Structure formats: C-alpha cells, structure tokens
Amino acid sequence: MKRHTLIIKKASEENLPALAAIENACFKVEVFSRRRIRYLLSRSKSIFLVALDKEKVVGYIVVLLRKHLGLARGYSLCIHPDYRRLGVGGKLLEKAEELLMDMGYRKITLEVGIDNTPALNLYIGKGYSVDKLLPKYYEDGGDALHLVKRLTP
C-alpha cells in the first residue's frame, strides 16, 4: 500500500461485509456481530470511520460520544492484519481526534489489553497516557489499561 492511496471517510452500510470480515480477522473474543456493526453504523452518538486502500476497506475506528459529559470514548480500532504497521491506525486515530476537536470534545479515553503491545505503542506515541489498570476487564479474564488524552486544537 502506498501511503497516498489511503482514504479516511465516514463508514456506511455498504461497508458492512468488509467491516465484519476485518472484525473477525482482528479479534478472537468479544467480536462484533454484523448486527452490532450495523447498529454502530446507524448510531447518531458515534464517529465511525473507515480507511480505504483504493476501494478496499483496510481498517476502521469507532468513537462513542458522550456529549453531556464532553467526553469521547475510543470503542474500537481495527486494522486488517495485512495492513498493520503501515500507519493506517495512526491516520484513523488522527482523523477521529480532529473531528472530535471540531465538535468541541476535549478529552478521549479508551481501554486496551495490557498485552497488546502494538496498540499500546500506537496510543502512547499519539499522546495517550495510562490512567489506571482494569483487572479482568475482558470476557476472557484479561486485564486492560485505561488510557486518556486531552485534545487540544
């Protein structure tokens, strides 16, 4: 993939089959069903972006919005295994944060598995800091870290 071919845009219903395939390629537990993805696509209280290499969906990000709290929560970031370590996750994260700032959000939080070193490196590299440990956070009993980032224009 050449970097200049990557396009980040709002996800749509037509992306559903590709999103479900990427979800299944990325996760083994707590995998979003097609129904859950469809619900997230239609939610008015979220940002759902896809990364496209030419016409192929290669990743996505979902951020849940809590307007009354002025807080956004990174819900899922998923990159197709063939497109990892190429900057796709960083581009999705940057675009989501840009949209959040335009909407007036000043803080984003997220959870990441304690053993997910690539994701942790991405988030730390993008200015997130560890807030606290979440023991037995995942369905399989795995621990997570709660991360936070202040968004500044």
Image: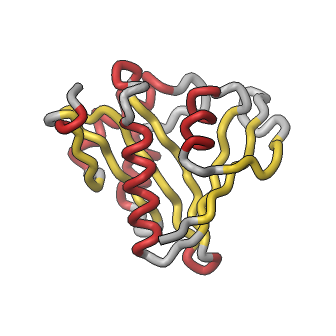
Seen at 42% across and 25% down, the residue is 85
Please state, as top left, top right, bottom left or bottom right, where the N terminus lies in the image: top left
Estimate the x, y position of residue 19 in percent, counting from the top left. Answer: 34, 37
Asked if residue 34 lies left or right of residue 109, the reply is left
117, 111: nearer the viewer: 117
95, 144: nearer the viewer: 95
Q: Is residue 31 above or below residue 101?
A: above
Seen at 38% across and 42% down, the residue is 60
Asked if residue 94 lies left or right of residue 142, the reply is left
Estimate the x, y position of residue 74 in percent, counting from the top left. Answer: 55, 52
Estimate the x, y position of residue 114 in percent, counting from the top left. Answer: 73, 31
Seen at 68% across and 33% down, the residue is 113
Farthest residue toward the top?
82
Q: Give the image's coloring scheme.
A: secondary structure
Seen at 72% across and 35% down, the residue is 138
134, 140: nearer the viewer: 134
17, 55: nearer the viewer: 55
Asked if residue 29 lies left or right of residue 19, the reply is right
| Total marks in image | 0
| Quarter holding residue 70 | bottom right
Estimate the x, y position of residue 117 in percent, counting from the top left. Answer: 64, 27
| Quarter holding residue 136 | top right
Asked if residue 2 lies left or right of residue 123, the reply is left
Farthest residue toward the left?
54
